[in-house]
Amino acid sequence: MNLLDRALEAGATHTRSELQLVGCVSFSLASKYHEVSAPTPQNWCDISDGAFTKDAFLAMEHRVLSLL
């Protein structure tokens, strides 16, 4: 939750529709730190039922990392 809070505070999203994407990216970053085998970007897209594409996920991941 810390990553999500910090990303939102830094302005990672401007629209409500991007909120799920920022949340998934934050959980993905946390899982890369804590898990031995973290889910792939495609796994996150599948979990979200196609709410965003793999390219959008990777772009938001880059954006969140550059903001933090």
Image (cartoon, rainbow, N blue to C red):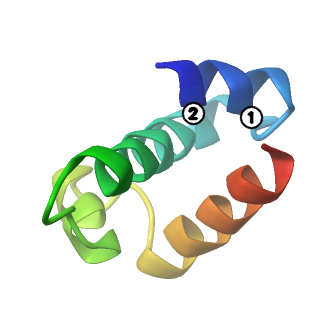
Relative to 10, 64 lies left or right: left
- Quarter the C terminus occupies: top right
| Amino acid type for the residue under numbered disc 1 | Thr
Where does residue 65 sit, x and y in percent of width and height?
71, 56
Relative to 39, 3 lies left or right: right
Name the mark on residue 15.
1
The answer to whether residue 3 is above or below residue 5 is below
| Amino acid type for the residue under numbered disc 2 | Leu
Q: Residue at x 43, y 77 (%)?
A: 54
Q: Residue at x 30, y 64 (%)?
A: 45
Q: Residue at x 74, y 34 (%)?
A: 15
The answer to whether residue 27 is above or below residue 64 is above
Name the mark on residue 19.
2
Mark nearest the camera among 2 and 1 is 2
The answer to whether residue 39 is above or below residue 55 is above
Q: Residues within 10 Å of mark 1 (few under 14, many from 20)?
A: few
Where does residue 66 sit, x and y in percent of width and height?
82, 58
Query: Residue 60 falls in which quadrant of the image?
Result: bottom right
- Circle 2/circle 1 CB separation < 8 Å: yes
The answer to whether residue 10 is above or below residue 27 is above
Instruction: Label 1: state its secondary structure.
Output: loop
Relative to 68, 61 lies left or right: left
